[in-house]
Image (spheres, helix red, strand yellow):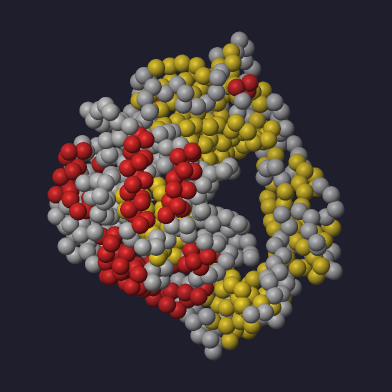
Amino acid sequence: MEWWRDARFGMFIHWGLYAIPAGAWDGTTNHAEWIRTTAEIPLEEYDQFLDEFNPVKFDADAWVKMAKDAGMKYITITSKHHDGFGLFDSETSDYDVMASPFQRDILKELAEACRREGIKLCFYHSIMDWHHPDYLPRRNWEKNRSVEGAQFPRYVDYMKAQLKELLTNYGDIGVLWFDGEWEDTWTHEQGVELYDYVRSFQSDIIINNRVDKGRQGMQGLTAEGDFRGDFGTPEQEIPDTGLPGIDWESCMTMNDHWGYNANDSNWKSSEDLIRKLADIASKGGNFLLNIGPKADGTFPQESIDRLKAIGDWMKVNGESIYGTEASPFEHLSWGRVTQKEIQGGTRLYLHVFDWPEDGKLRLSGLKNDGIKARLLANHSLKVNVQRKEDELVIELSGQSPDPINTVLVLDIEGEPEVVSPPLILAEEDRFVDDMKVSLQAGKFEIRYTIDGTTPTSASDLYSSEILITDNTVLKARFFDDQRPVSGIRTQTFTKVSMQSAQKLSNLQSGLNYQYYEGDWNELPDFNNLRSKKSGTASQFGVDGKVQEEHFGFDFTGYVNVPENGAYRFYTSSDDGSRLYINDQLAVDNDGLHGMVEKEGLVALEKGYHKIRVTFFEQGGGDDLIVSWKGPGIAKSEMPASALYRQ
Ligand code: FHN
C-alpha cells in the first residue's frame, strides 16, 4: 500500500459508449453512464452506439500528461462499466472497442503512456453487467429480455477471463477498483474468491472493498467481518474525521455526473477541489477525482481548466500532500493540517484556507518545543511563533499569498504532542428532568465551568459526574500545574418538555402499512396515491414488497416508550425514508441513496406515541431499518415488542 498512501491523489476516468448520447435521451438530459437503465434503452437500441464509437481525438499521452501535470500519481479508468462495453481488446467478447469503428486498444495505449510518464495505471471493473446474457438479474424494465438459459456462474467465468486479460496484457496494474457488487447474485463467497483470483495474477495489486459485500453504502467503509478489500471507497463524500488504521479513498465528480453529460454545468470550483484535496489528505485519505471524457476522446474544457488550476497549486505545495499522514489535531476553524516525519522531528503543514484578519493564526494544544515556522512557498520568509498558554500564535503579515490555500511549515522536535480538549461524555444534549455528564479523564487535571465562562486555574476541578438540572453551557479544559495545556471544549445542554403520551386501549401488536408502486426520485405524498395493498407487519422493513424496485411503504402505529426522557430515532434506508412521532417529522432521510442513516431526537412521556415511517426504493439495493436509543435503551433496532396498532 505504500505507493498508494504516498500518492494521495489520482484521476478517475468514466468513458464508454454512454459518452455518445452525452446524457441526453428522448428529451431528457440528466443521464450519464447509467443511461441504458435510467432511460430504459433496450439492448439492441443501445448497441447502435457500438457502431458510432470513434473517438478520433483520443490521445493517451495528452490524457496522462494532464493527469501528471495536475499532480495525480495514478489513473483509474473504466475497463468495463455496468453497460458491459470493454475499452480494451478482449478475446472473450465481441462487445469491446475492437468491434467499434475505432478498433484501437485504448487501455493498451493508456498503459504505454502511463509507463512513459511514471503514472500507475488502475482499472475500474464492474461486476454488474447489463449486456452479458448470463448476468442476472435483468433490469426490471427489461420485460422482454429473456433470462432463458442464463447461467450466472458462466458470467462469473467470463468476468474472470476478462480480468485475466486485463491483468496479463497491460503490464503492472496498481489497483483493481471493483464496482456494481450490490446485487443479490453477487455473494461474499464470490467476493473472497475474486479477491484471491486477482491477486494470483499480480500479487502486489491493490483491490478496493467493492470486490466483496462489506462496503457500506456511499460512506464506503468496510463493515466489521472478514470482508475483502484493501481500502474503503467513500463516494461523493469525505469522512468527517480521520480514520486511524483505515485506508480509504474518496471518489468524486467535478460536476454531477461520472460519465460525460453535455448539459451538466454544475462544476465544482478549482478552489473547492484544491481544498477538498487538503481536507482528504488531512484525514489520511486519497482523492480520486473524476473526468468524464467526451465521445471524441477529449476532456471537457471545464475539466481541463480545473486540472490546470490544481496542478499550479500542487507544483508549489505538493509536498504538503504526498506522503503525508493525517492531522494530529481535531477540527481547526481556519484550515487543515497534514504531517510528515523528518530528521529528528515532524514537519506540520498548515493549510490556511481562512487567513486571520488580525494576522494571528492560532493553533491550540501543541506541547512541543523547538518550533521553526516558514511559508512553504517561500523558504526565506520566516514566520514568528509565540506561545500564549496552550496556544501557538503564528504571526502572519500582510495578505494571504494564496487565498485558496496557503501552506505554512512548522518543524517540531519529536512527534507532535497534542492535547485536545477533554471529551464531554453525555448521552444526549437535551434532557427532560436532569442528566449526568462526565468528562474524559486524561493525564492532566480538568477545570470546568457551567456558566459559559472560560475555565481558569481557579475554576472547579473535575472529579466526578456533573449533575445538570437546567439549561447549561459547559466548558472544560486541561491544566498542567495551573497552566492551561489544551483548548476549551464547549457543549450546551437544553432542558426540553416532553410530548404527552396517548391514552389508548384495545391495541394489537405490530404495525399497519400501505404498499405502493411507482418510480420516484424522492418520497411521494402517499396520501395522494392509491395503494397497491395494505397489511400488517411485526416490524419496519421491506418484507411486504411485491416487486424488487419502484415501490414504497407507509407504516403507521404506536411505539410504547418505557420511561420519560429524550429518545433518539434513526432510519437507515436505501432509498429514502422519513419518521414521524405524533405527526411531527423526527427523521428526514429522504433521497436517492445507498444505506444511509439519519437521526432525530424527541422528548417523550412514558407510554404510547404515534409513529409513522414512509419509505421508497427506486433501484439497486433496498432495505429499511428503524432504530432507537433512550433512557435504559442502547441504540438498537426498534423491537416488535414496542410496536402496536389499532
Ligand atoms: O453505479 C456506479 C456509478 O456509475 C459510478 O461508477 C460510481 C463511481 O464509483 N460507482 C457506482 C455508484 O455507486
181 up-or-down from 245: above or below: above
- Does any portion of residue 523 appear in the rendered image? no
Nearer to the camera, 297 or 446: 297
Q: Position of residue 338 (x, y in %)?
A: 56, 69
Nearer to the camera, 174 or 7: 174
Nearer to the camera, 560 or 495: 560
Q: Position of residue 67 (x, y in %)?
A: 35, 68
311 up-or-down from 132: above or below: below
Which residue sits at x=80%, y=65%? 479
- Does any portion of residue 628 appear in the rendered image? yes
Most extreme residue toward the top, as rendered?
506
Which residue sits at x=30%, y=69%? 113
Q: Is residue 408 left or right of residue 194?
A: right
Q: Is residue 425 left or right of residue 160?
A: right
Nearer to the camera, 417 or 139: 139
Q: Position of residue 428 (x, y in %)?
A: 68, 43
Q: Is residue 397 left or right of residue 303?
A: right
Q: Position of residue 114 (x, y in %)?
A: 34, 68
Query: How many numbered markers are drawn?
Result: 0
Quarter of the image with the C terminus in it = top right
Which residue sits at x=44%, y=45%? 194
Which residue sits at x=47%, y=43%? 193
Q: Quadrant of residue 54?
A: bottom left
Q: Is residue 386 left or right of residue 155?
A: right
